[in-house]
Amino acid sequence: MTNKINLIDDLVAQRLIDALKNPDEATPGMIQCALRYLSDNVKEGAVIEPGSAVDQILDNLPFKMTGTDD
């Protein structure tokens, strides 16, 4: 069961990354989904691994999040 959950999480993260990279797909709804994904998957003070799905989502948001190192 854990493998299926990890697979779903990976697929959702990749879909969000792909959508954020494409201006036609980066709708307000998709951006809201990305923010919710980050909210659900990143704890305050967590170290974000370079190149991870979370890092890629943050890099592709059409704005910069406050409290990040970028």
Image (cartoon, rainbow, N blue to C red):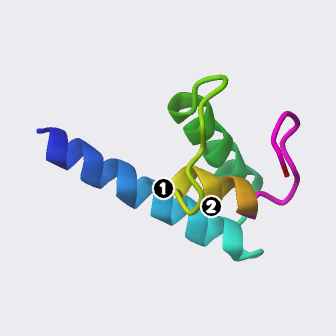
Total marks in image: 2
Q: Residue furthest left?
A: 1
The Cα–Cα distance between marks 2 and 1, rounded to whole angstroms, is 9 Å
Q: Position of residue 67 (x, y in %)?
A: 85, 33
- Residue ID for mark 1: 13
Residue at position x 43%, y 55% from top?
12
Q: Amino acid at mark 2?
A: Gln
Left or right for 33, reference 15:
right
Residue at position x 56%, y 63% from top?
51
- Closer to us: 51 or 4: 51
Q: Is residue 25 visible?
A: no
10 Å neighbourhood of mark 1: few (<14), some, or many (≥20)? Answer: many
Q: Is residue 58 visible?
A: yes
Which label sits in the foreground, 2 or 1? 2
Left or right for 24, reference 18:
right
In the image, residue 12 lies in the stretch drawn in magenta: no
* Above or below, comparing residue 17 to residue 8 in the picture: below
- Quadrant housing residue 48: top right
Return the disc, 2 or 1, that comes first in the chain's sequence: 1
- Residue ID for mark 2: 56
Q: Position of residue 4 (x, y in %)?
A: 18, 48
10 Å neighbourhood of mark 2: few (<14), some, or many (≥20)? Answer: some
Left or right for 38, reference 15:
right
Q: Amino acid at mark 1?
A: Ala
In the image, residue 64 lies in the stretch drawn in magenta: yes
Secondary structure at numbered mark 1: helix
Q: Quadrant of the N terminus?
A: top left
* Above or below, comparing residue 70 to residue 15 in the picture: above
Q: Are marks 2 and 1 in contact (CB under 8 Å)?
A: yes
Residue numbers of the magenta segment: 60-69
